[in-house]
Image: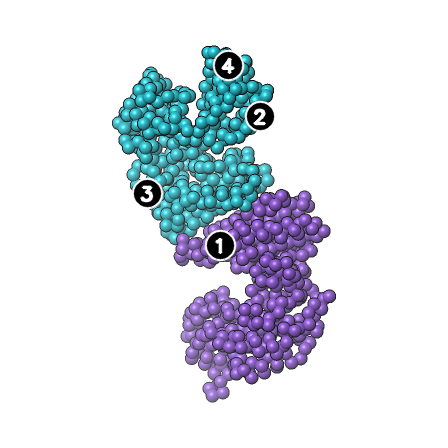
Chain colours: A purple, B cyan
Amino acid sequence: MARVVQKFGGSSLRDLSYIRRAAQIVARRWHSGDDVLVVVSAMGDRTDLLSSLALTAYKHSDDENAESDVLLSIGEQESASLMALSLQSLGLSARSFMGWQIPIETIGVHGKARVKRIGTSMLVDTLDHRGIAVCAGFQGLMVRGDRISTLGRGGSDTSAVLLAASIDAQLCEIFTDVEGVYTSDPRLVASARKLSSINYEEMLEIASLGGRVLETRAAAAAMRYKIPLHIRSTFSSNEGTEVGEGIMEERAVTALTHSESDAKIAVLGLDNQPGIASKIFGQLASNGISVDMIVQGMTQDEGKAHIAFTVLKTDISRACAALESIRESTPYQELRCDDNVIKLSLIGAGMNSSAGVAARMFTTLAEKGINIQIIATSEIKISVLISADYLELALRSLHGVFDLSNAVEDLKQ
Amino acid sequence: MARVVQKFGGSSLRDLSYIRRAAQIVARRWHSGDDVLVVVSAMGDRTDLLSSLALTAYKHSDDENAESDVLLSIGEQESASLMALSLQSLGLSARSFMGWQIPIETIGVHGKARVKRIGTSMLVDTLDHRGIAVCAGFQGLMVRGDRISTLGRGGSDTSAVLLAASIDAQLCEIFTDVEGVYTSDPRLVASARKLSSINYEEMLEIASLGGRVLETRAAAAAMRYKIPLHIRSTFSSNEGTEVGEGIMEERAVTALTHSESDAKIAVLGLDNQPGIASKIFGQLASNGISVDMIVQGMTQDEGKAHIAFTVLKTDISRACAALESIRESTPYQELRCDDNVIKLSLIGAGMNSSAGVAARMFTTLAEKGINIQIIATSEIKISVLISADYLELALRSLHGVFDLSNAVEDLKQ
């Protein structure tokens, strides 16, 4: 008998018939003897619809308007109450909890609030009486102002992991519309293979580098609180991907991800003087724009510096405006933007002890005539920025070279 | 400068364009210098849709399931946030308040909770800073259990009047899709005339006897707390009907209403012994069934008693089952149900000082060959139960006889 959190995403809750199917999964778990806390996203694409409704009501509202959160949060209120009713109709005792009821106390700004504290007494009381607690994901209560807040896109994953941590759950199951975490995107790489287990560090890199199966903050929270995850499909009973603390030494490369959310900005012909980078990135930071990959170089002819970096595509026009505004104090010759780029990443917990991964990656891409624009590395990943035109070619070549379809699996066993 | 509550019903908030039109009305009032608290119903027929969704999720749920209230309450959360956003887009400072935030504390049962206490500090603070408080109608917070509750059908009217009372508002405007309170239903009686003012007692009778313009509990609350009401149309700037404390002596009959919600049950051939009525009505009461009009008679031949009464059409099968179950201990010969009946009511604050209203009513109906099945009277109303077949004939005849199209108006001025 364990405490288990089961989280269902919007694609698993498209309409009432989907919710009832998910309720069957919850009921099976409960009947096995476990205590179950359910976390639900909004049904289908509800959040998108509500978000555009808010924008229609007030076109020039800023992103952090508390009223938008009031509207957005009804999506999860709807699915949580319908899940509770569906569980009741199966003869189980179930009740819904909104973010403000639990409470999931948040700080920061509306639309992307951060969880500060979670009240557990009502939840634990429900579970201890063999009731099923159905929690609305994505939403919380802003400590200051007593207002409904939301956690930003994919926030229900974060709700699930943090709720699991707060009630000392032994497992957090993430139910989604794919079978688990894959070595690469199965829609683009036919030989992509489902991973039966990965560790937290790998999950975090996969999530942040384009894997769409789990939100990055949720992966970080799982790692921090050591919550075992099981990412699996709502629509089959196959085992999915377990995420835990295992160390997989024999596996240099676990997964190959790609992200289409980045754009490249190049600032060309800067005076090459100390502090030039801090001026550029300081200006972007003070406008709230995050920079990811960076490369700095110098031209041979004039002693001018170049800086290139990536920002989110959604930030590109604000980034360019911010840089135009400092052109007088920080002169440069040209600003170039390119959003036809892709970030490819090789991820593996054993990468830093396995020589030559980077070299093999660069060689493979060079042989296919693919130019690498920026490189970024960490202990367990190598990312390269390339032209989007080569996405599939690069994915398939690298997937083959690193033999991902046949990687040794399940070293935990 | 006054404090004003403005309540908008679902038909005034059918979609976002309607909400923006309503926001314009609020803005005009605010710009005139008044402080405005807005109460909103759910958009259009949202509540009906959510209600049937809850029933689909859990067919055998009882009416007082707390989870249904969680689902139903999202309707007003949606309209309140969209109203606040629409007001903001007009440059005004506005924020929404849910029932649990205010809080509107309730007791009783889910689905038809009663308001016990309203917290006013946040509302008053908002108004005092010239902000517009947008309150979700229909919903509250159950004191016991910290759960979302709803006030039952038409509950937003009650929310509006009680909120007006709690903040000492000088006026509560009820915006709806008709121009005000009419002498009779304009869809059935072409000569029906809008009343420019009526008093609380009349409003209460009209509301409870079939007038669909204001909920009965709201009329009772307005009378109790002496909140001046103005019932008017969202879609025109015409004056509607004022409801206040005026006494209209010269007007014996103010309005003629009809209700189609009742059904008649006749219990025939009862032993005529003391306590027979208390057995019948005790049994119904213990099953939670309200009885309205009652007539008791005796047959000449056998010394048997007959009792006939009305219950809500929605209660009729439960009422019959309850009476079948006591047939052994309280024998009767026959149970007859008839739902093809209509309750017609003449209402007027001056009725009890004006002799002959009842006699004229009965004569008029007799002349048209309309049989009166049950009669019920109070100080300011006379109701009769007749066959539904004669609805329009009876309405038009009585409207003419009592000269309602030309009644003296506005005695308050």
Task: Tell me if mark 4 has few (under 14), some (14-19) or many (20+) residues whose alpha carbon lies within 10 angstroms of its own.
Answer: some
Q: Tell me the CA gap for discs 3 and 4.
A: 57 Å
Badge 3: chain ID: B
Vertical placement of B41 versus B320: above or below?
Answer: below
Q: Tell me the CA gap for discs 4 and 2.
A: 20 Å
Q: Which mark is residue A46?
A: 1
Q: Nearer the viewer, mark 3 or mark 4?
A: 4
The reply to the same-chain question for discs 2 and 1 is no
Question: Residue beneath label 3, please?
Answer: B235
Badge 1: chain ID: A
User: Which element type, helix, strand or loop, lies under badge 3?
Assistant: loop
Residue B4 lies in quadrant: top left
Q: Which percent across, then down, holds residue B190?
A: 28, 32
Task: Tell me if mark 3 has few (under 14), some (14-19) or many (20+) residues whose alpha carbon lies within 10 angstroms of its own.
Answer: some
Badge 2: chain ID: B
Q: Nearer the viewer, mark 3 or mark 2?
A: 2
Amino acid type at mark 1: Arg
User: Which element type, helix, strand or loop, lies under badge 4?
Assistant: strand
Answer left or right for A174 relative to B50.
Answer: right
The reply to the same-chain question for discs 4 and 1 is no
Q: Tell me the CA gap for discs 3 and 2.
A: 52 Å
Residue at the image position 39 percent from the left and 36 percent from the top = B172
Amino acid type at mark 3: Phe
Q: Tell me the CA gap for discs 4 and 1.
A: 64 Å
